[in-house]
Amino acid sequence: MNLYELYDAILNGKLEKAVEVTNQAISQSIEPQIIINDYMVKAMEEIGARFEAGSAFVPNLLMSARAMKGSLEILKPLMNNSNVTPMGKVVVGTVKGDLHDIGKNLVCSMLEGCGFEVVNLGVDISSEKFIEAVKEHKANIVCMSALLTTTMTYMKEVIDAFENVGLRKDVKIMVGGAPLSEDFANEIHADGYSDNANSAVSLAKKLMAS
Ligand code: B12
């Protein structure tokens, strides 16, 4: 088995092949984190670069995303560590107007795998929905994701809405997504920013302890 076949399958949007190689990798006890970070995420980065360069198009992105999701679904249960007491409760969503969910789902899987209880709200999430979910689940942390420069600004609206309903001091707010930066996170008064799913976990742990 060659893990580059997985990279290739995701890059070329081949779901069945991606699932097949992922299963082979699992049977050879390769760490899910290595499979995800070194091959799957790299393939998504490459298809993104090709899209930017005009050599791949929206249908290619969709097919790659489908293959990525298929593999992630198989790896997800392996990352769940059910023997640990929950480290904290996290509500996660992609903000209103934005339908990108691959990175967000990776963040969810990593958090779950490291012992957090995760409520994944999905995509296109309004401030009202974030607030409702925090109240309902008594969450400690809110994670917002945005992949578009046109939707990242909505994060500030969500943070303001938490302030307006008097809940801001009760939750830590983390933000992420390709167009964001540490400076942007500071500007909108988020509690933390990270540019990948691994460091999102250490950030969440740090925020729980603060
Ligand atoms: C796949 C993809 C799509 C797929 C999404 C499928 C899906 N289910 O998610 C589809 C085809 C649907 C799509 C649609 C569009 N897309 Co698109 N898409 C991408 C692409 C190629 C990859 C995104 C991705 O999955 N990356 C892989 C994951 C693993 O990385 P990630 O999302 O960045 O997440 C990591 C970190 O950012 C971080 N993270 C993410 N969220 C969070 C949250 C927290 C709290 C933390 C701590 C960390 C964190 O951790 C993650 C894991 O390490 C990017 C290009 C790129 N290079 O990003 C364009 C891109 C984001 N898309 C773009 C565009 C323009 C669009 C469309 C407008 C295209 C169109 N004309 O229709 C639509 C918009 C639809 C909408 N309303 O959302 C542009 C955005 C440009 C901009 N500056 O705003 C990009 C940058 C491509 C480009 N260069 O032009 N897209």
Image (cartoon, rainbow, N blue to C red):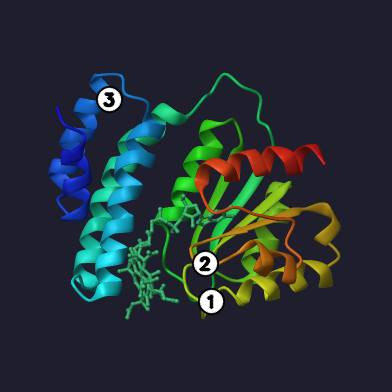
Point out which mark residue 151 bears.
1
Q: Which residue is mark 2?
A: 146
Tell me how far mark 3 sits from mark 2, CA to CA.
Answer: 31 Å
Q: Residue at x 24, y 20 (%)?
A: 27
* Between discs 2 and 1, the one toward the N terminus: 2
Image coordinates for residue 96, horizontal then vertical, percent:
54, 73
Q: Where 161 falls versus 105 (above or below)?
A: below
Pick the front one: 99 or 153: 153
Q: Mark 2 touching mark 1, by CB under 8 A?
A: yes
Image coordinates for residue 150, horizontal then vertical, percent:
51, 81
Q: Quadrant of the C terminus?
A: top right
Q: Which residue is mark 3?
A: 26
* Residue 70: quadrant of the picture: top left
User: Is 12 on the left-hand or right-hand side of 29?
Assistant: left
Quadrant location of ligand 1?
A: bottom left
Q: Mark 3 touching mark 1, by CB under 8 A?
A: no
The amino acid type found where label 3 is placed reads Ile
Tell me how far mark 3 sits from mark 1, CA to CA.
Answer: 36 Å
Image coordinates for residue 43, horizontal then vertical, percent:
27, 51
Tag 1's secondary structure?
Answer: loop
